[in-house]
Image (cartoon, rainbow, N blue to C red):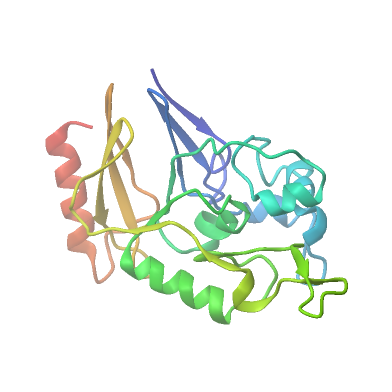
Amino acid sequence: MVSLTFYGGVNEIGGNKILLEDDGTRIFLDFGMSFSQSGKYFSEFLQPRKCNCIIDFQVTGLLPKLEGVYRQDYLNYLGYAEEEKSIDAVLISHAHMDHAAYIHHLRKDIPIHMSPKTHAIMKTLEETGSGTFKDFIHHTETFKIRPKKSGTGYTKIKGEDAKNRRPLKVFEYGKKYSIGSVEVVPYEVDHSLPGATAYLIHTTEGTILYTGDFRFHGYLNEATERMVETAEELKT
């Protein structure tokens, strides 16, 4: 049975977090921030607590309450037991924060799929952006300690020693690949930043088109037209 559960992006612009389930395969389509919901609680000078952020985000409705999805380093700090991974992949449509901001909160073993241009943007945001929650390409261990080299006491793991590269799939447009029971074909579309992607997802019960954000009037309008024509030919 194929199902779609919307944890964001309904009756609002952005905030997309859509869970696709098919024959044991579980994929999130985007994992973004709801600007309207976030604005009710946080601002430039009032940010979530890193030490309690998963709970803060869940209580305020910014993140769904799901097991096997979120960073184990944060959950361990909060006293939660180890959880088994429950998501096979996250497909990112583009690098705007209302579609990609909450990659930071995901477990380090969940594969993140994105276009080459989206990868370049997310890497730049991670390296040069301000703010606390910007682990997009890497997962930087937080609250983790190790014995001091002197042999006396402990010290926090920092810098490059704390970084783990997330399992990323940087795909080629138009090339089909599989995730469990589904097959995915990414298509480039025009949007207000490079690398925007629509996904044709072939499930066991038919094909789903997830467009993300797109437009017909930009410099890549022909790419958007091709995506629509392809979808029409497949009768999605």
Residue occupying image coordinates x 31% and y 50%: 198
Q: Is 160 or 204 nearer to us in this picture? A: 160
Lateral position of residue 201 relative to residue 110, left or right: left
Tell me where residue 115 sits by quadrant: bottom left
- Whether residue 212 is visible to the viewer of this picture, yes or no, is yes
**Residue lying farthest to the right in this orientation:** 153
- Image coordinates for residue 177, horizontal then vertical, percent: 24, 45
Q: Is residue 220 left or right of residue 56?
A: left
Give the quarter of the figure containing the N terminus. Answer: top left
Q: Quadrant of residue 25?
A: top left
Residue at the farthest front position = 151
- Where is 82 relative to 2, above or below? below
User: Which residue corresponds to the image point at 16% horizontal and 53% vertical from the top-left?
Assistant: 226
Frontmost residue, 116 versus 166: 166
Residue 189 in the image: above or below residue 120 = above
Question: Residue 187 location, x and y as percent?
Answer: 24, 53
Residue 112 screen position, x and y as percent:
44, 54
Taking 191 as reference, is 18 above or below it?
above
In the figure, 175 relative to 66: above or below? Answer: below
